[in-house]
């Protein structure tokens, strides 16, 4: 290689994917969420152009659905055309969200786009077979639930100057993600690649330094759990074949979850100030990008009683949302969860002989199964009539909070007596 | 221990400036008839503690006073002092004040006294009459559930667990009800269903979009085919139309050639006729150059004619002038010819004129000097007495000698001038010499004469001088005369030698010389004029001769004189011009004829070519019907092309419309937005559901605790009520239950048969209520620590036996809390004092 080879590795674009578990009640926020995956992809294209990349690798799930919404394809095509104008090629592998199906009717893409076949690992020399600077090995999913170990089908040729494996896979059985194309790090190493361009895991990870086995993560966090940096990886292969990696953030909206300690708070104003301060913290840390913020109110606090009184949290959220949307960049207070506790001495109560002690002892006696049963019993009518209920509750925690709520109510006037 | 000492009614209902007290530390029995104000005092205590009811209150009696604004005072006492709590009716119950009558100020006394007891609780539990007896049960399930408060109080809580549970369930109910629609989760679920429906619609629209995209693809294929067919037919139409046009043009060309040939042939004939008809004057053309030259020389000829006339006039004029000048000079031409008019002669005449003038002048001057000196000498001689010897006369003054020298120099100059022929110098010398002589004589004469002797001597001297001078002047005059005569003689000789003998003086000679010179110039002019006349005459004659020769050749009349020659030449030129025009016309006609013949040939050739091409085209197209058939084919092709174009346009429009529709749908964000909205709703449902579960679990926890507490730990207060009630009823009802859930209070007889209060007699029920109050108050040491219990004839419906039990119970309570019992029944008062011998007794009179 006479000069460094630069390529950009991205995955899990999930173009046109709806954000999950977000309460985007405001139109401006909603529009930003709808546009976010496209904007992140546009940023990746910008990175390719700025870095004068030779090609862009997308390791699966470029689209969110197998039928590939026309809108998503259209935006993808527009981006590919921009890259084509700069002479940048695009290598795409289909993932579990966008397997290469015979029934799909994709839009015709410009000539710089190459989609790896689904039947077997495909070998593509770049720029051509006559004088390759590197060789890409890739394979698309032929079905959404691909459960076979595709990594075993990869094997580099001895003559390859620099070999890149492109695969959408769950490496090492990450139970946070679907176990598609399961494989181990050893399987990948055995293929002899110089760089593994992986997709499927939405958080940026480098599973191995030598050879680099990289999940770039999704370019844009798609739900409240996808906090932190999201982007793509710029790979610079030195003339001696040594790759250098740089993670570049592309997320247009930042998911953030913050805990707000209200131990010192006593009044609704104290809570409001703490929430505002948390919003400012989120804004400051977002690097000039809008923030989708979730707050968890914590602590044994004098404000617990105020918060427990029904609509205060809702009113507080409404007020803070309104004011935070007027700032730039805006912060959307997606959710505020009140997990504060009353200022009570649980041990003292537990050791007493009064009614409150009875409540504590009853709660203590509820084991995990009983708690789950109680929660299930309460949820049953809800779940039978409300389809859109997707709760992941820790029954024991719920029982604790219920206990605290009771104690808080029972002992609210104790000081006055 | 704080206790109520007095109740003072300033103005309250029937009470006016009335005082009840002093009250005992334990039981106080107040005996008074009806309308003595027992109920008023009970109400007054509540009003002072909690505020007066409004004047328009309907829920309770306002106790308005005819004496004015309601006002009352309560005097409390303890070991530390005595204080009065005073209130006047007004806004929000009226202002209240606390002041110390004795001991320290206790501004918080009122709160301390009533601590933890609401007005309603006071009314039900602390200050009650028969009317309020049943409230302790009837308020159950409400905010003023006194039974629940019993539990709360008994359980060491500030609020009722039942209230808390109800609040939790109510809050949960606001979030969700199984068949509700307004609770938040129910409403959100409905919103989610609506959004799902919308998303379903959008998905169906998406499916339609796929169909439309497929249709668009098909249409694009059809459109491409239609485009190809349209273009092919258009090309065929254009080709046929072009060929028809070409063939038509060829036919038109052939016809046009025929028409052109007709014209060309006609033009050729006309031109040939013109050639034949035009006659050219060849003679004139042959002499055209000569005639042209003659015409060109015509102006010279005319100038020569004019020259002849001018030369002739000039010769005549010059001869006349010559003769006149000679005549003026008085000379004949022959004499004139002898005059020397050279410049030397003219200079000589001028010099002679000067010399003669100078000589004459000297002559006249010398003569005048001679005459003057002679006259002076004569005159002196006549006046002089003695002739003065010449020698005696002293020499003149100092001016004599210079003048004598001047005279000598003048003489020398004169001699030199004459010798050298410089007559001017000679003349000047002469004049100078004369001047010197004269002035010397004057100088001498001017010398002073001697008087007498001397004067005579000087006068004689002077006379001698004058005579000498006169002599000298005479000599000079003679010399000058002689010189002048010599000059004149020399002049005569000089002018004779120059043919100027007739001119006597230089002036005449000069004039003659001028005239002769002028005459000679006139003669010269005449000779020149004569020579020019001859040349011009020759030119005129020559021209005339040339004109005559040409006229003869051209058979034209010869010009008789030069003036006629001009007209002749003009006619010759006209003839030549006419001849030339005729020749040009004939040549032009000949060219036209030739050209027409050439174009005829060319046109015939082109026509043949066009015919040949048309035949080839017809043969190539295979249209035996020729142009008509070809045009018909082109028209049909045009129709076909139009139909294909219309088909293409229709498909194109459909395609564009579909594309627009598809594009619009594809650009539509609705699906994404609806999905996000659904996510929002689901998120909110989840959040509320979590809260709902928490509330429900909290309620259940509470429920379980209540059940266990009720089951395992009957509250002391209920047990105390049970004991009191059993005592009042003489153990007819040894047990009672006060369920936590708000269900009816039940009493159990000795056979454990349960009865709820509805099935009890009024008196028994009131005994139960009294028992509950007494038990409750007995448990509330810290609650309302300064509050007395005020009972208004609550034993009224008790039988004597149970009155006794009740009195004993009241007396028992009075041991721990101040009790004031109002009654209008002396036997009741007696029972109470019997039960509590230490009881204070007060009486009231009817108001």
Image: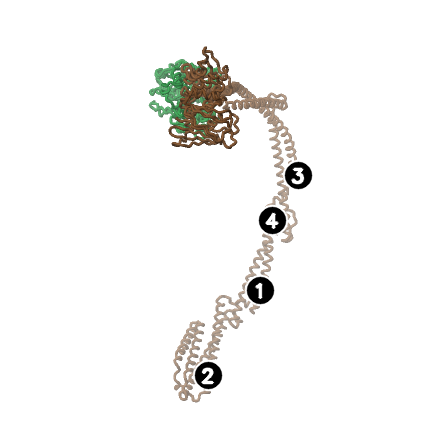
Tell whether label 1 touches label 2 (CB within 8 Å).
Answer: no
Name chain B's colour.
brown
**Quick one: SS at disc 4?**
helix
- Disc 4 from disc 3: Cα separation: 30 Å
Q: Which is more N-terminal, label 3 or label 2?
A: 3
Q: Which is more N-terminal, label 1 or label 3?
A: 3
**Do tags 4 and 3 sit on the same chain?**
yes
- For residue B321, which numbered disc appears in the image? 1
Tell which subunit mark 3 falls on: B
Q: Nearer the viewer, mark 4 or mark 2?
A: 2
Left or right of B547 on screen, residue B142? left
Q: Which is more N-terminal, label 4 or label 1?
A: 4
Q: Residues within 10 Å of mark 4 (few under 14, many from 20)?
A: some
Residue that lies at the very extreme toward the top in this rendered image: B751
Q: Which residue is mark 3?
A: B277
Tell which subunit mark 2 falls on: B
Tell whether label 3 touches label 2 (CB within 8 Å).
Answer: no
- Disc 4 from disc 2: Cα separation: 96 Å
- Disc 2 from disc 1: Cα separation: 59 Å
Q: Which is more N-terminal, label 3 or label 4?
A: 3
Q: Residues within 10 Å of mark 2 (few under 14, many from 20)?
A: some
* Chain identifier of the green chain: A
- For residue B295, which numbered disc appears in the image? 4
* Residue B644 location, quadrant: top right
**Do tags 4 and 2 sit on the same chain?**
yes
Q: Nearer the viewer, residue B615 or B173?
A: B173
Residue B655 position, x and y percent, is 55, 22
Q: Which residue is mark 2?
A: B376
Q: Nearer the viewer, mark 2 or mark 1?
A: 2
């Amino acid at each position: 290689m006479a000069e460094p080879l630069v390529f950009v590795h991205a995955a899990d674009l999930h173009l046109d994917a709806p954000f999950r578990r977000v309460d985007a009640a405001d139109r401006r926020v909603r529009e930003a969420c709808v546009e976010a995956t496209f904007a992140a992809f546009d940023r990746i294209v910008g990175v390719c152009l700025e870095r004068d990349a030779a090609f862009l690798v997308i390791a699966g799930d470029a689209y969110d659905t197998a039928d590939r919404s026309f809108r998503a394809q259209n935006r993808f095509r527009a981006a590919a055309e921009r890259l084509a104008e700069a002479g940048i090629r695009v290598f795409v592998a289909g993932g579990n969200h966008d397997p290469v199906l015979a029934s799909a009717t994709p839009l015709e893409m410009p000539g710089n786009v190459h989609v790896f076949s689904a039947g077997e690992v495909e070998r593509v020399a770049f720029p051509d077979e006559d004088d390759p600077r590197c060789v890409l090995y890739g394979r698309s999913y032929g079905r959404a639930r691909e459960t076979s170990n595709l990594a075993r089908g990869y094997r580099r040729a001895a003559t390859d100057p620099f070999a890149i494996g492109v695969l959408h896979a769950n490496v090492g059985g990450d139970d946070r993600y679907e176990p598609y194309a399961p494989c181990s790090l050893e399987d990948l190493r055995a293929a002899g690649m110089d760089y593994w361009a992986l997709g499927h895991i939405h958080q940026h990870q480098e599973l191995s330094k030598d050879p680099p086995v990289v999940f770039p993560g999704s370019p844009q966090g798609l739900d409240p759990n996808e906090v932190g940096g999201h982007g793509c990886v710029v790979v610079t292969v030195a003339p001696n074949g040594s790759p250098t990696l740089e993670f570049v953030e592309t997320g247009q909206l930042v998911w953030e979850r913050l805990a707000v300690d209200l131990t010192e708070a006593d009044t609704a104003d104290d809570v409001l100030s703490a929430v505002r301060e948390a919003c400012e913290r989120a804004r400051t840390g977002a690097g000039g990008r809008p923030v989708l913020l979730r707050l968890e109110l914590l602590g044994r606090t004098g404000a617990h009683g105020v918060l427990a009184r029904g609509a205060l949290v809702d009113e507080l959220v409404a007020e803070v949302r309104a004011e935070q949307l007027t700032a730039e960049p805006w912060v959307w207070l997606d959710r505020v969860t009140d997990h504060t506790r009353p200022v009570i001495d649980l041990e003292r109560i537990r050791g007493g002989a009064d009614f409150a002690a009875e409540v504590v002892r009853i709660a203590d006696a509820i084991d995990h199964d009983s708690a789950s049963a109680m929660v299930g019993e309460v949820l049953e009518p809800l779940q039978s009539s409300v389809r859109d209920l997707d709760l992941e509750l820790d029954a024991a925690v719920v029982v604790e909070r219920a206990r605290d709520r009771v104690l808080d109510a029972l002992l609210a006037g104790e000081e006055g007596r | 221990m704080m206790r109520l000492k007095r109740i003072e009614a300033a103005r309250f209902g029937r009470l006016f400036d009335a005082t009840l007290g002093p009250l005992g530390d334990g039981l106080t029995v107040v005996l008074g008839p009806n309308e003595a104000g027992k109920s008023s005092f009970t109400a007054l205590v509540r009003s002072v503690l909690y505020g007066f009811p409004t004047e328009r209150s309907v829920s309770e009696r306002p106790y308005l006073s005819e004496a004015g604004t309601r006002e009352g005072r309560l005097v409390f006492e303890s070991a530390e002092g005595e204080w009065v709590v005073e209130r006047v009716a007004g806004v929000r119950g009226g202002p209240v004040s606390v002041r110390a009558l004795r001991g320290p100020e206790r501004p918080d006394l009122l709160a301390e006294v009533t601590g933890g007891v609401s007005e309603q609780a006071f009314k039900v539990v602390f200050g009650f009459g028969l009317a309020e007896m049943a409230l302790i049960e009837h308020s159950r399930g409400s905010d003023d559930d006194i039974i629940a408060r019993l539990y709360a109080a008994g359980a060491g809580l500030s609020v009722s667990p039942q209230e808390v549970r109800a609040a939790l369930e109510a809050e949960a109910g606001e979030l969700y009800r199984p068949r509700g629609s307004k609770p938040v989760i129910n409403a959100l679920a409905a919103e989610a269903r609506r959004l799902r429906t919308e998303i379903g619609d959008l998905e169906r629209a998406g499916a339609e979009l796929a169909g439309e995209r497929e249709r668009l693809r098909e249409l694009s294929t059809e459109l491409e085919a239609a485009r190809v067919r349209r273009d092919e037919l258009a090309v065929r139409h254009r080709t046929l139309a072009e060929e028809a046009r070409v063939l038509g043009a060829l036919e038109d060309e052939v016809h046009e050639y025929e028409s052109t040939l007709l014209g060309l042939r006609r033009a050729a004939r006309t031109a040939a006729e013109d050639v034949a008809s035009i006659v050219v004057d060849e003679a004139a053309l042959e002499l055209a150059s000569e005639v042209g030259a003659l015409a060109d020389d015509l102006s010279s000829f005319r100038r020569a004619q004019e020259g002849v006339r001018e030369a002739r006039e000039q010769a005549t004029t010059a001869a006349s002038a010559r003769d006149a000048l000679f005549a003026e000079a008085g000379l004949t031409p022959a004499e004139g010819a002898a005059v020397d008019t050279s410049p030397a002669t003219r200079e000589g005449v001028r010099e002679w004129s000067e010399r003669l003038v100078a000589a004459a002048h000297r002559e006249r001057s010398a003569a005048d000097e001679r005459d003057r000196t002679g006259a002076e000498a004569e005159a002196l001689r006549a006046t002089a007495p003695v002739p003065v010897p010449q020698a005696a006369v002293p020499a003149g003054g100092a001016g004599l000698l210079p003048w004598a020298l001047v005279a000598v120099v003048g003489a020398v100059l004169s001699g030199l001038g004459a010798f050298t022929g410089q007559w001017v110098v000679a003349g000047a010398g002469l004049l100078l010499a004369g001047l010197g002589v004269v002035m010397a004589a004057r100088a001498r004469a001017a010398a002073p004469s001697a008087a007498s002797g001397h004067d005579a001597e000087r006068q004689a001297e002077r006379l001698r001088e004058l005579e000498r001078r006169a002599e000298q002047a005479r000599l000079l005059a003679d010399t000058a005369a002689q010189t002048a005569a010599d000059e004149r003689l020399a002049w005569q000789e000089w002018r004779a030698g120059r043919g100027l003998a007739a001119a006597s003086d230089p002036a005449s000679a000069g004039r003659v010389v001028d005239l002769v010179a002028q005459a000679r110039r006139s003669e010269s002019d005449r000779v020149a004029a004569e020579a020019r006349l001859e040349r011009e005459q020759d030119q005129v004659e020559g021209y005339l001769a040339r004109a005559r020769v040409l006229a003869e050749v051209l058979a034209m009349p010869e010009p008789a004189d030069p003036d006629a020659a001009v007209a002749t030449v003009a006619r010759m030129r006209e003839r030549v011009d006419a001849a030339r025009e005729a020749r040009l016309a004939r040549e032009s006609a000949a060219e036209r004829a030739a050209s027409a013949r050439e174009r005829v040939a060319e046109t015939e050739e082109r026509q043949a070519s066009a015919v040949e091409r048309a035949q080839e085209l017809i043969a190539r197209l295979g249209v035996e019907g020729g142009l008509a058939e070809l045009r018909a084919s082109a028209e049909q092709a045009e129709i076909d092309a139009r139909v294909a174009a219309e088909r293409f346009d229709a498909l194109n429009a459909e395609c564009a419309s579909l594309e627009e529709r598809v594009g619009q749908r594809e650009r539509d964000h609705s699906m994404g937005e609806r999905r996000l909205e659904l996510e929002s709703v689901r998120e909110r449902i989840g959040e509320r559901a979590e809260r709902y579960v928490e509330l429900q679990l909290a309620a259940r926890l509470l429920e379980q605790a209540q059940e266990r507490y009720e089951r395992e730990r009957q509250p002391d207060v209920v047990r105390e009520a049970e004991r009191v009630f059993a005592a009042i009823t003489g153990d007819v009802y040894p047990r009672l239950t006060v369920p936590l859930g708000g269900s009816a209070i039940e009493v159990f007889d000795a056979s454990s048969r349960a009865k709820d209060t509805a099935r009890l007699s009024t008196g028994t029920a009131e005994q139960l209520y009294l028992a509950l109050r007494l038990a409750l108050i007995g448990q509330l040491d810290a609650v309302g620590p300064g509050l007395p219990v005020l009972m208004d004839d609550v034993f009224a419906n008790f039988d004597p036996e149970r009155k006794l039990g009740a009195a004993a119970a009241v007396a028992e309570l009075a041991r721990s809390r101040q009790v004031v019992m109002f009654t209008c029944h002396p036997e009741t008062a007696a029972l109470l004092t019997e039960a509590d011998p230490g009881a204070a007794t007060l009486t009231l009179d009817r108001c």
